[in-house]
Image: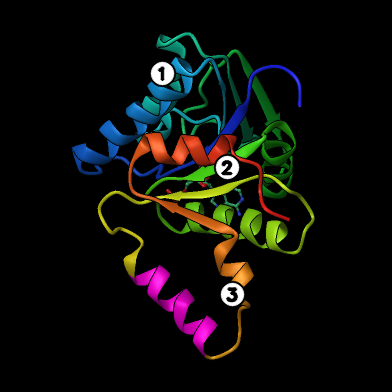
Amino acid sequence: MTGPLSVCVYCGSIEGLPERYLRLAADVGSQIAARGWQLVSGGGKAAMMGVLGAAARAGGARTTGVIPQALVDLEWADHDSDELLIVETMRERKALMEAHADAFIALPGGVGTCEELFEVWTAGYLRMHSKPVVLLDPDGHYAGLLEWVRGLGERGFVRPEAIERLVVATDVSAALDACAKPVDS
Ligand code: AMP
C-alpha cells in the first residue's frame, strides 16, 4: 500500500439517534483526519454518516462517498465529499467501498450496517481480502450479536479463526490502531 490509509466506515443512517452515537461518528472522522488518513463512506449526509464525513473533512481528511442513485435523496447525498461516486445498486456500492479501502470499521448501526459488516467480514475470513475488519462498540450495542456469534462458534457453525478475524474495539483509538495493523495470515 502506498499513500495515506483509506478507512471505510459503516454506521447508522437513521435520523434521531441518541447524541452519543453522533459524537462517536464525529470522533472517528476527526481521528481519521488527525492520523492523516482518508475516509470512504456510503456517501450520505443523514445521521451518523453526515457527521462522520463533515468531521473528517474539517480535520483535513479527503473523503470518498459511494451512493446508489436511488438513495441520493433518501440519504441526502454528501455533495461536499471530495469524491462522490454514484452507482446503480447496493452491490456496486459495497464493491466500490471495499475496493477503495484498506480497512473497515463498523460503528453502531442498524440492519444496513450489519449487512455491510457481515459481507466484508466473511470475505475476510474466506481470504478474499486481507484488510482489517473492526467492530467499534463502546457501549455494548453489539453485545447480543457478539454473543450469538460466539454461540455459533460453540455449536460448530463458525471456526474460531473466523470469529477472531473480526477485531472488536471499545474505543476509537484502538479501532484505528487495528486498521493499521496487518491481519495475521
Ligand atoms: P443502517 O445501519 O440500516 O442505518 O444503514 C446504514 C447504511 O447501510 C445506509 O447507508 C444504507 O443505505 C446502507 N445499506 C443498507 N443495506 C445495504 C446493502 N445491501 N448494500 C449496501 N449498503 C447498504
- Residue 19 in the image: above or below residue 134: above
- Residue 138 in the image: above or below residue 24: below
Residue 65 as seen in the image, left or right of residue 52: right
Q: Report the number of numbered marks.
A: 3
Residue at 58 percent across and 52 percent down: it is 116
| Res. 117 image quadrant | bottom right
Question: Which callout, 3 or 1, points to the residue nearer the camera?
Answer: 3
Q: Is residue 74 visible?
A: no
Name the mark on residue 75: none
Residue 10 as seen in the image, left or right of residue 16: right
Q: Amino acid at mark 1?
A: Ala
- Give yes or no for contact between labels 2 and 3 (Cβ–Cβ under 8 Å): no
Element on which disc 3 rests: helix
Residue 170 percent coordinates (x, y) = 33, 48
Q: Main secondary structure of the magenta part?
A: helix
Give the quarter of the figure containing the N terminus. Answer: top right
Q: Residues within 10 Å of mark 1 (few under 14, many from 20)?
A: many
Give the quarter of the figure containing the C terminus. Answer: bottom right
Q: Is mark 2 within 8 Å of ligand 1?
A: no
Q: Which residue is mark 1?
A: 54
Name the mark on residue 160: 3
Q: Residues within 10 Å of mark 3 (few under 14, many from 20)?
A: few
The residues bearing labels 2 and 1 have C-alpha atoms spaced at a distance of 19 Å
